[in-house]
Image: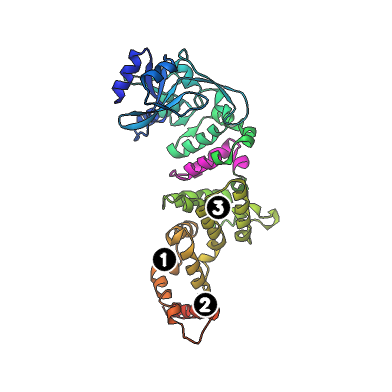
């Protein structure tokens, strides 16, 4: 069944079909659109079920169906209203019947650019809340005060500011701020989901800056908030405090790799600076040690992917040493440790390059040095060396080879 046939059949039954949400928004932004979501108005659900028995209901508290249209499984929802009745994203009472208008359905949505519909049959845009105008202005604006009913909308607005390079209007920032207490009832998985999507954007820093504008950064990511005001030696960091430095690094790393674990490592490489005592500033002695502890506590609150944790802990610990090592044994040990880390050398080098603006010689040519180190193995070990001494012999031989390289 194609889209036109679907819409015509719904119209024959007395209803109307619209495409809503991201697909319409992206078409208007002249960007490649993603999956289509449909809304049906002026039709009873039981009539829909009778005429589309192949549709599978997936919505629990309100009618949403999966239906194959143009060869793809698409979401088909019925127009609805919502009323806040409790805490968190489940704290809604939903009203759904054939008398609910499209404008009412769009009114419950988060931002104006996501509250635009496309009439499948007439091919007309329905934009009751001036979403097209806000897209032209490159601004994110809440449809109404109901924006604050679901606190994750605040995260989504910050993430879309980062994704689209839009600004958030002042009134919407105020609504975002009003969500602060509601985050206590939100599963950390929802917060992590928006963090993950924000790190996938070209400029992840916009996400964190927008949250700070809305006075939500301390609540949601206290480890990053703690970097604000932590001054650094101006000679090495003309960009400003530890927060400004971190924002610069996460964007630089994002420009080098799509690997989210590497981008996260760039974000957290200096989080230890957030715990520097005021009397020590602008220096941050030992921040590479305390940073690991801070990341472990973050993981206790919000379970992070294993690769993110292993990569982040390694970068926190080693990023200061990497550009300063001069003694061969320590260089050899770092090369072998970096090889085992899930970020790999390419990922580790992204953070070091962003942070130090250059790579030490042994990281720049790591493939050549590793090949030499791996030329020594247990197969080369003299037969009279046994047990734990084998590992020490291999290490010493590798150090000799590196020294001659």
The span shown in magenta is 191-220
Viewer-proximal residue, 397 or 71? 71
Viewer-proximal residue, 212 or 144? 144
Q: Which residue corresponds to the image point at 49% horizontal and 72% vertical from the top-left? A: 332
User: Does the image show residue 121?
Assistant: no
Sequence-wise, the earlier of marks 2 and 1 is: 1
User: In the current view of this chain or complex, which residue is farthest to the right?
Assistant: 279
Viewer-proximal residue, 141 or 22? 22
Magenta segment's dominant SS is helix
Q: Are marks 2 and 1 in contact (CB under 8 Å)?
A: no
Number of callouts: 3
| Mark 3 closeness class: few <14, some 14–19, many ≥20 residues within 10 Å | many
| Mark 1 closeness class: few <14, some 14–19, many ≥20 residues within 10 Å | some
Q: Give the residue at mark 2.
A: 391
Q: Give the residue at mark 3.
A: 268
Q: Which residue corresponds to the image point at 56% horizontal and 50% vertical from the top-left? A: 240
Q: Which residue corresponds to the image point at 53% horizontal and 79% vertical from the top-left? A: 392
Mark 2 element type: helix
The image shows residue 342 at horizontal and vertical percentages of 47, 59
CA separation, marks 1 and 3? 23 Å
In the depicted structure, whether residue 14 falls above or below residue 171: above
In the depicted structure, whether residue 192 falls above or below residue 10: below
Sequence-wise, the earlier of marks 2 and 3 is: 3
CA separation, marks 2 and 3? 33 Å
The image shows residue 271 at horizontal and vertical percentages of 59, 53
Mark 3 element type: helix
Answer whether residue 210 is magenta in the image.
yes
Viewer-proximal residue, 237 or 168? 168
Sequence-wise, the earlier of marks 1 and 3 is: 3
The image shows residue 43 at horizontal and vertical percentages of 41, 15
Answer whether residue 148 is magenta in the image.
no
> Residue 364, which numbered label?
1
């Amino acid at each position: 069944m194609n889209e036109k046939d679907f819409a015509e059949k719904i119209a024959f039954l007395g209803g109307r079909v619209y495409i809503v949400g991201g697909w319409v928004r992206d078409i208007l932004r002249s960007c490649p659109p993603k999956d289509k979501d449909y809304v049906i108005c002026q039709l009873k659900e039981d009539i829909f079920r009778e005429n589309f028995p192949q549709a599978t209901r997936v919505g629990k508290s309100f009618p949403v169906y999966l239906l194959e249209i143009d060869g793809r499984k698409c979401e088909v929802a019925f127009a609805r209203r919502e009323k806040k009745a409790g805490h968190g994203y489940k704290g809604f009472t939903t009203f759904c019947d054939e008398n609910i208008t499209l404008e009412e359905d769009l009114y419950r949505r988060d931002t104006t650019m996501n509250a635009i519909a496309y009439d499948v049959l007439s091919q007309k845009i329905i934009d009751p809340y001036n979403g097209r105008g806000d897209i032209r202005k490159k601004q994110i604006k809440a449809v109404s005060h109901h924006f604050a009913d679901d606190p994750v909308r605040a995260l989504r607005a910050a993430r879309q500011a980062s994704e689209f390079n839009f600004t958030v209007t002042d009134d919407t920032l105020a609504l975002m701020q009003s969500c602060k207490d509601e985050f206590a009832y939100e599963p950390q998985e929802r917060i992590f989901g928006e963090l993950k999507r924000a790190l996938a954007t070209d400029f992840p820093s916009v996400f964190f800056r927008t949250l700070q504008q809305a006075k939500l950064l301390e609540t949601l990511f206290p480890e990053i908030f703690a970097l604000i005001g932590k001054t650094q030696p101006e000679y090495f960091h003309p960009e400003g405090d530890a927060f400004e430095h971190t924002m610069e690094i996460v964007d630089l790393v994002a420009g080098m790799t799509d690997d989210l674990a590497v981008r996260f490592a760039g974000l957290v490489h200096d989080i230890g600076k957030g715990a520097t005592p005021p009397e020590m500033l602008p220096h941050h002695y030992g921040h590479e040690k305390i940073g690991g502890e801070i990341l472990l506590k973050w993981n206790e609150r919000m379970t992070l992917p294993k690769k993110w944790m292993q990569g982040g802990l390694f970068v926190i610990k080693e990023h200061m040493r990497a550009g300063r090592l001069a003694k061969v044994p320590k260089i050899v040990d770092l090369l072998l440790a970096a090889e085992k880390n899930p970020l790999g050398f390419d990922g580790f080098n992204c953070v070091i390059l962003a942070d130090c603006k250059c790579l030490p010689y042994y990281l720049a040519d790591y493939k050549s040095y590793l090949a030499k180190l791996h030329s020594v193995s247990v197969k080369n070990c003299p037969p009279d060396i046994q047990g734990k001494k084998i590992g020490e012999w291999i290490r010493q031989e590798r150090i000799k080879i590196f020294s001659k390289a």
